[in-house]
Image (spheres, rainbow, N blue to C red):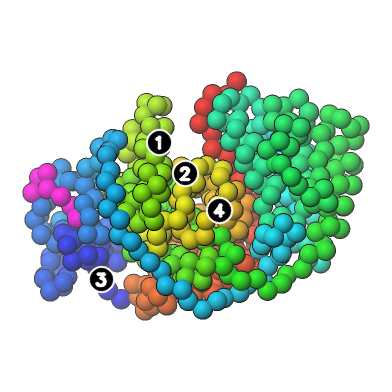
Amino acid sequence: MQDVIRINQEDNVAVALRPIAKGETLEIGGTQVTALEEIPQGHKIALQPIAKGGEVIKYGFRIGNAKEEIQKGQWVHVHNVKTALGDLLDYTYEPTHPQVAETERAYFEGFRRPDGKAGVRNEIWIIPTVGCVNSIAQSLEKAAKKLVGGSLEDVVAFTHPYGCSQMGDDQEHTRTVLADMVHHPNAGGVLVLGLGCENSNIPVLKEYIGAYDEKRVKFLQCQDVEDEFAEAMKLLEELADYAKGFSREKIDASELVIGLKCGGSDGLSGITANPVVGAFSDLLISKGGTTILTEVPEMFGAETILMNRCETPEMFDKTVHLINDFKNYFTSHNQTIYENPSPGNKKGGITTLEDKSLGCTQKSGSAPVKGVLAYGEPVKNKGLNLLSAPGNDLVASTALAVSGAQIVLFTTGRGTPFASPVPTVKISSNSQLAGRKDNWIDFNAGCMVEDKSKEELAMELFRYVLEVASGRKVKAEEAGFHDMAIFKQGVTL
């Protein structure tokens, strides 16, 4: 195993792959560097003197400027580096015209729905229109577990606190997200559970849902019946009978839509887990599949890389709006655009938002950008898509699911147990985390700095994803975890 890694030949810092003791001398790119202080794993060491105000280079790009003079061998982190980012920027389209060559087909065992979509799970989803009926939904989930069997894999209630007392975009987002959930192919049956007096009541929500299969989607407004629990159980039994009529069949991997997300990143995330996911993304796209990258605030500082991979000038313009609209969202609430990275990120070795973003965007691989999606907008174009959503783990992962992702890949250097509406694969950036939190982590990308190449790990991850798509449960599913979070932006009445 290497002691340190210099990611790009232009870099003036290297990343410690293990804790480096003060006074230890390292061979880095043909140059000896003696550590002037202890360097924690995942953190940066200066390879040369950096003047006050000078650029700190990692991944071949500036990740910030030195607050003070930095000596060769010194620890480089938040105490001596600051972000170099500004506010709204003007961008110029400088296309790089990336291409991903086609490769041989691959297949998974999934569920073909009557509308032509492919699901990787066959579950019944209970979707409340309003938070007031959350407790009823949870009681129904518990009681309806007895219906699971045959090809029906689970019954899940997706509770949330919204659906009433909302205004403007918040109310629209709630309705859009709930309607998207109704149409998700991982659900073999859906019970929409309403109260009756809420803003986003069932008649209103039906306008957002549009056409639906009456055998697959049932509605119950609790205020309209004497015993809502008994009536709901009758509907769930009907849905279970319907869902059990589906069985797994061979489906081309070109029909997979995979969400890409990271959280609790550390200094190794941009070296191991995120590049492995990027190589996976290219591999799936080479087979005709689709990936979706989100968490827009964690594109700040690396956005031009994505912009220049846009297939057309129109796509470039959409990406510029994607970035600047999110910056305006921050400033409209009188918040600092670059209030990032998080305390956990910093502890793991990430210094500035540029540092975080340059690692984060590696999940996109090298493919051209084929689509740019608004929050809650279903994916339409195969290939790499960008989605408007915040960095918050639960909100962003839910956004990926409602835009059509059947599975979410979630890279992490710190670890997290959360789930989303769809199978959420936790990918560790380091082997210590994978060993310590085996009950959370599904795939270890930390091997990339030990004994495996990025390409080997990407292929292993691809095979694992096909297994998950074919029914293998991820750790969060084994624990019975299912989460959903809707993006709230405005006033609550």
Q: Residue at x 35, y 56 (%)?
A: 309
Circle 3 sits on which residue?
3
Q: CA distance from mark 1 to mark 2?
A: 9 Å
For residue 388, the mark is 2
Mark 3 touches mark 1? (CB < 8 Å): no
> Label 4 neighbourhood size at 10 Å, few (<14), some (14-19), many (20+)?
some
Q: Are marks 1 and 2 in contact (CB under 8 Å)?
A: yes
> Dot 1, how many residues are within 10 Å of its Cα: few (below 14), some (14-19), or many (20+)?
some
Dividing the picture into quadrants, the one containing residue 197 is top right
Q: Residue at x 86, y 58 (%)?
A: 241
Q: Is residue 397 left or right of residue 48?
A: right
Whichever of labels 2 and 3 marks the residue nearer the N terminus, that label is: 3
Residue 86 percent location from the top left of the image = 25, 37
Q: Which residue is mark 1?
A: 325
Q: CA distance from mark 3 to mark 1?
A: 41 Å
Q: CA distance from mark 1 to mark 4?
A: 22 Å
First along the sequence among labels 4 and 2: 4
**Mark 4, residue position:** 380
Marks 4 and 1: in contact by CB < 8 Å? no
Q: Secondary structure at mark 3?
A: loop
What kind of residue is marked 2? Ser
Mark 3–mark 4 Cα distance, whole angstroms, equals 44 Å
Quadrant in the picture for the N terminus: bottom left
Q: Position of residue 359 (x, y in %)?
A: 34, 56
Q: Which image quarter: residue 191?
A: top right
Q: Which residues are magenta?
A: 51-57
Q: Earlier in the sequence, mark 3 or mark 1?
A: 3
Given residues 35 and 298, the one toward you in this image is 298
The residue at the point 61 percent across, 71 percent down is 252
